[in-house]
Image: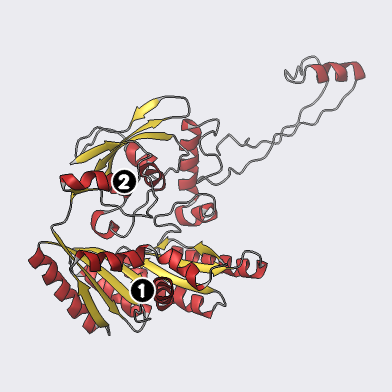
Amino acid sequence: MDVVVEPGIGWMELNEYLEPYGLFFPLDPGPGASIGGMCATRCSGSLAVRYGTMRDNVISLKVVLANGDVVKTASRARKSAAGYDLTRLMIGSEGTLGVITEVTLRLQKIPQYSVVAMCNFRSVKDAADVAIATMMSGIQVSRVELLDEVQVKAINIANGKNLPEYPTLMFEFIGTEAYAREQTQIVRKLVSEHNGSDFVFAEEPEAKNELWKARKEALWACFAMEPNLEAMISDVCVPLSHLADLISRSKKELDASPLVCTVIAHAGDGNFHTVILFDPNQEEERREAERLNHFMVHAALSLEGTCTGEHGVGTGKMKYLEEELGVEALRTMKKIKAVLDPNNIMNPGKLIPPHSYTVRVYRWEILDLYHYAQLMCNYAKCQRNKVNARVFSAEGVLPHEIE
């Protein structure tokens, strides 16, 4: 099942249209995200643990290239081995290779039944360990979200709730009624084996929506604690086996900082965010926020992770790409960019780090003022056969040339 849409439609608007047909598009990033932007950044959301990312849910694209060519990247077939995978090349390119004008999306059936559960832990490591154990057990969860105690406090302040202010895991189980309930009880046992407590679950639509609403509005809840501050948000992701280690190391660093910091994780796929609140008018606080962000990125990279799990590179994370991908991969990306967009008109300055370059330098020894004047008038042609001069060139590459 699939649907063809234009890039400006929002995912929530699309799902409202699909609901009467019993179908939905199974990615849920921020509420205002459009399908085109989701393609450009290769985003995901809390449902990625079950349905994958944008990379897994786009069948084909129609893209306008820098020279005006219109390219359809694939057919609507469920699978294909025909040529290079142009669809995946464009997804995550952040507008640097072309403009997306049409998207064919893979759809899913709306689950028959779902259960939402919540439980608390003594530490974020215990919570992360349960998330890992759940995924390793083969249980078909559709969401596994982790909130630290600071984030839970923010939710309480913002929404007038009275949730226990401890590291918290939230789960969603889908399927038939019997299957969803069975999986809930299996996870309940896992939680009790890892020092978890206060395991509660909801089956009624209103109760489930209320729980997930608190999670979706987590960022805005942070500003309820510190309404005059700005937020710096990290987006690191590591192999699931390293998640507990990374969160523990990061949490220790965050708690030692004078800034207010919260942890929000898509714990089922190793991706977690920190919301670092700081006063933009205080340079010391800005530097501290940047230090914390750098710490988490480099910690993630040391654990075979990435600087961005779902938010994209933009300009802020370009400096990490060489460490993450290597010089050869970056050189290949630059070559692709140069071929598809030789004049650098497609979202310049984003995603691809600036080219390293030098400028050709010419030194002229002028022996005759007449020839000097002639040379100045004809410098574009550099009529060296008419001018008694020597040229010395410092070889290098111009900004549009690739090393």
Residue 244 is situated, as x and y percent measured from the top left of the image, at 36, 74
At 36% from the left edge and 28% from the top edge, which residue is drawn? 71
Judge from the rendering whether residue 4 lies leftward or rightward of residue 330; answer left or right. left
- Quarter containing the N terminus: top left
Q: Residue farthest to the left?
A: 178
Which amino acid, by three-letter code, is at mark 2? Glu
Residue 394 is situated, as x and y percent measured from the top left of the image, at 71, 36
Q: Residue farthest to the right?
A: 369
Give the quarter of the image for residue 372. top right
Please, what secondary structure does the residue beneath circle 1 have? helix
Residue 208 is situated, as x and y percent measured from the top left of the image, at 24, 66
**The disc label shown at residue 13, or none:** 2
At 53% from the left edge and 52% from the top edge, which residue is drawn? 318
- Quarter containing the C terminus: top right
Residue 103 sits above or below residue 266 on the image? above
Between 291 and 379, which is closer to the camera in this rendering?
A: 291
**The disc label shown at residue 358, or none:** none
Which amino acid, by three-letter code, is at mark 1? Ala
Please, what secondary structure does the residue beneath circle 2 have? helix
- Circle 2 crowding by C-alpha within 10 Å: few under 14, some 14–19, many from 20: few
